[in-house]
Amino acid sequence: MGNPLRTAQDRRLPRIPEPCALVIFGVTGDLSRKKLIPAVYDLANRGLLPPGFVVLGFARRDWGDGDFESLAYEAAKKGARTPWREDVWQRLASQFQFVPGSFDDDAAFDNLAETLDDLRERNGIPGNAAFYFSIPPAAFPLVLNQLARTGMADNAKSGGWRRVVVEKPFGADLESAIALNQLVDEVFTPGDVYRIDHYLGKETVQNILALRFANSLFEPVWNSKYVDSVQITMAEDVGIGTRAAFYDASGAARDVLQNHLLQLMALVGMEEPTSFDPRDVSAEKLKFLKAISLPKDISKGSVRGQYLPGWVAGERAPGYLEEKNIPANSTTETYAAVRLGVQNRRWAEVPFYVRVGKRMPRRVTEIAILFKRAPHLPFDPADVEMLGNNQLVIRVQPDEGVVLKFGSKVPGTTMEVRDIAMDFQYGEAFTESSPEAYERLVLDVLVGDRTLFPDAAEIEQSWQVIDPLEAAWKGTKPEPYRAGEWGPRASDEMLAREGRAWRRA
């Protein structure tokens, strides 16, 4: 007999993890305070964490559990998405522990291993632990070697599962990505490695798969016969903040294009997987990434830019070279746009225009599918002057939703046709607010669901796209654009040469 207290609509039970520990390296850093700790609280508030759940924080601070609890309290209360409930926090906070130490401190890692062993007796956690690397990429090898030395990464030795979560950027080029993949796969089994791209945790990104594969409406026209081009834009209105050292060494292409935007492109262009099994989804994404082709002349098919002083949202914005800790002669790009092709039957001859930039007029991430114009228009040319391409626009942020643009007659005595928009917004269509990306992804790690995590082959194939771009750009100067503009003029000219224009996001 089934549980009489359960209803078919309650989908939570299969998504509640086994008793486990979440070990956060770099727990006092920005990512942990702004995203991870609030995500853990929201999961607890939604009833999605098991009673036997512990958060272990590891960082270079000589703190006790009480100090760590105070930091976590402030972080959770400030960043929580769900309503604040003191009783939920008190239950969760009793399971917070802090382990001080540096990454080269053997004694600290021995202490961490002993603490995890103690949880087996004290909290009934049968050796299950996920290690979250909220640390600079340069520290990854050091921490991985410590986990290997102490045996904390060993499933058999722990008596449960041991998983590792690695934040982007995963390597700085193909060579370093391969080396890091080999190291992490030696320390943990490949199936226990979760390479996190937080964009894939966003509801609208996951909705790309639902939009394409749960409906018969779009699939017949999702190909080169009907699609003119695809534009993927990630615009930020902010500068580099406190990330000067990292950003100046990386640039826009390595920071965002290699991971976020190529993953979005793969979800838009991949073939339908045979099932939603993580291996099937990853196999289709990998096939698509392998089919990506770079422009024959990279100098004409791509644009690098760097922002100058200007105005954003009515406020004066400094130029990139005026940002704190940026060298006065830096040639790092803050804007990158590239025309990519796809060598398969579905997308043959369809250009994918991908762009990313900082200090743009506003913050927006969107995917625009631009359809070909009707082969024949029986209207007077003057009546269709305001008619453009049909468009399907998937807005990833900030106004999550989908817009369908098509032509309609203007009320009146003439047959004037112009574009109108049907607009679906998540916030209006559903009563439940979307979870934060990290909320979804942390839960996926704890339940062992790898669907939204790129595997090693995807990461390496993405670098196969970026490395030739970086090689072609080496020694060149980025095109200037003023803060508050939609990128350099050369970016508009790149599309204009093919009779197209960037969609005004």
Image: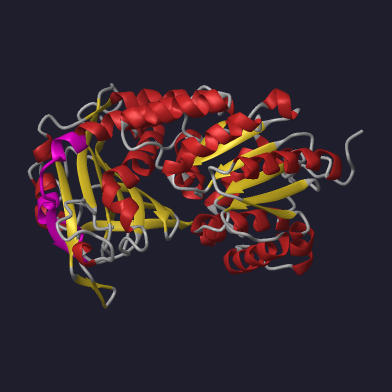
Q: Judge whether residue 99 can be spotted in this image.
A: yes
Q: Nearer the viewer, residue 279 or 425?
A: 279
Q: Nearer the viewer, residue 307 or 490?
A: 307
Please provide percent x and percent y for residue 329.
14, 57
Q: Is residue 371 magenta?
A: no
Please provide percent x and percent y for residue 87.
79, 65
Q: Is residue 45 left or right of residue 219?
A: right
The stretch of residues the image draws in magenta is 469-492
Looking at the picture, does residue 416 appear above or below residue 196? below
Q: Quadrant of residue 262?
A: top left
Q: Nearer the viewer, residue 405 or 314?
A: 314
Looking at the picture, does residue 59 appear above or below residue 186? below
Please provide percent x and percent y for residue 186.
53, 23
For the view shown, which residue lies furthest in the right direction?
A: 1
Q: Is residue 474 magenta?
A: yes
Rendered residue at 76%/62% (across/down): 88
